[in-house]
Image (cartoon, helix red, strand yellow):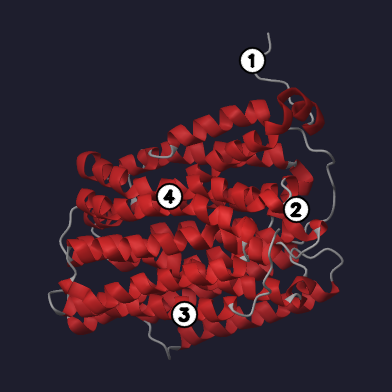
Amino acid sequence: MQLLPRPATFESLALLHGTRFKWRLLLVVGIGIVAGVLSTSSFNVAITALSRDFGIGQERAQWTMTGFMVAMTLSMLPTPWLLDRLGFRRLFLLAVMTLTLTSVAGSLASSFPAVVFIRILQGAATGILQPLGTLLVMRLFPPSNQGRAVGILTLGLVLAPAVAPAFGGLLVDHFGWQAIFLLNLPFCLVAGLLGLYWLPLPREIVTRRFDWLGVSLLSLATLALVEGVSSLQHSGLMAWWTVAQFILALTLTGVFVWHARRSPSPIIHIELFGNRTFTMGSLVSFTYGFGLFGSTYLIPVFLQKALGYSATAAGMVLLPGGIALALSTPVAGRMADRYSPKYITMGGLMLFGLSFLMFAVLGGHIGDKELFAATVTGRIGLGLILPALSLATLRHLDTQHLAQSSTVVSYMRQLGGVLGIAVIAVFVQWRESIYGSAAPGIFSAYSQGFMVLSTVVLLAVLAAASMKASKVA
């Protein structure tokens, strides 16, 4: 008796399910990515409880986020090779199964090192899932429908962070931080079951050498960069250890460029950056990721530590902005099919940066109405960016470059996110050590943190302005 469905080819499944089959594939992958996104966004409201239970400071507690983000970033690098080696179906199901097992293990963890280790495994699985949605859209959907497809795919991605802080806050307040690990478990199970039935066998398995040297160089460079940023807190800017990490990161990056120019199959083809739009889009992805994940970390901590909100209250404050994000994303997807994604991206970035500026200027004087305005403005901006940025960056590239280029864009976004969390956590901790952890000093520290985010997003606007404009009739 066969308990599991027998995998079929894409052609036979498309014939069986008709023209809607590609939308079903989008649904499966979208649910899987949502499971990974929940692992990222829901954990922020648990930082304060985690610090309290284990008796650690914010600079250590943030490693549950930074470790996740580092693993998520580095695991993206081998994704194109894994796709060739395993195929879409096996790779997706393997990542979802890893998320499922780590969610259960995380809820049972009894030490801080165990929590960090499990978060690293979750990050690795999430990083593999991240580029798959964009790759599916660019391969299966014509340009005239790509905006709509990305908008629908992104709807789940933004709806998850919209409700995650509220539900996560309730779980933390009533059951402790351990319960936060179980929030994504239903999505893991649904994605796994649907994937078994609907994901097709690969059309062709490609066997090629893995670029171990390239991945090692980029991984070590990333780790050195993150360690350099983190050591700013305990060692200072001019300390030999800090300077050595930044020099090491720069040197390893240079060696990777030299290696990639000479390797027949590098993990990243340097020639991709000869396209100005792709280069500027990757830079926008980096700065956008810095602002996105830096703010995702900073806002809940600001609400709880500076304004005295409970985890539940902090999650509820962020809920209207999440709803605005969910409503604006499908509209932005439709707009990207009719207008240049470049200008939609720029408009979204301006609104995103404006929200940080509102937090920075108001500081401790921010009230309920101002919180509502700031979070809703930022999330509408985010809703405009998400569907348009990938299209603006990738639409001009050849099909054979899509797997690697979509991975590079995702990698740059996550690298920006890793640095965003680390930089903002260290920066605010540093400013608190100067101003104090009581009012009004703590408000000054957080205001300056939001000003850093606003400046970074402004740089993203300038990079987006250099991208090539396109319009789909």
> Can residue 98 be seen in the rendering of this structure?
no
Residue drawn at 71 percent across, 58 percent down: 473
Q: Which residue is mark 3?
A: 458
Residue topped by disc 2: 81
Label 1: few (<14), some or many (≥20) within 10 Å?
Answer: few
Amino acid beneath label 4: Leu
Image quadrant in which you'd find residue 10? top right
Identify the mark nearer the N-term, 4 or 2: 2
Q: Position of residue 133 (x, y in %)?
A: 62, 48
Q: Is residue 45 in view from this perspective?
A: yes
Q: Which residue in the rendered view is the most extreme toward the front?
A: 473
Label 2 with label 1: CB-CB less than 8 Å: no
Q: Residue furthest right?
A: 264
Q: CA distance from mark 3 to mark 4?
A: 25 Å
Name the residue beneath numbered marker 4: 327
How crowded is the residue under tag 4: few (<14 C-alpha within 10 Å), some, or many (20+)? some
Q: What distance separates the C-alpha of mark 3 from that of mark 1?
A: 54 Å
Q: Is residue 276 left or right of residue 177?
A: right
The answer to which image quadrant residue 61 occupies is bottom left
> Along the polypeptide, which appears first: circle 4 or circle 1?
1
The image quadrant that residue 98 belongs to is top right
Q: Which circle marks residue 3 in the picture?
A: 1
Q: Position of residue 258 (x, y in %)?
A: 77, 79
- The residue sitting at the left extreme is 439
Front residue of 225/324: it is 324
Quadrant holding the N terminus: top right
**Secondary element at tag 4:** helix
Q: CA distance from mark 3 to mark 2?
A: 35 Å
Q: Nearer the viewer, mark 3 or mark 4?
A: 4
Alpha carbon of mark 4 to alpha carbon of mark 1: how far?
40 Å
Q: Nearer the viewer, residue 337 or 200?
A: 337
Percent x, y of residue 207: 85, 48
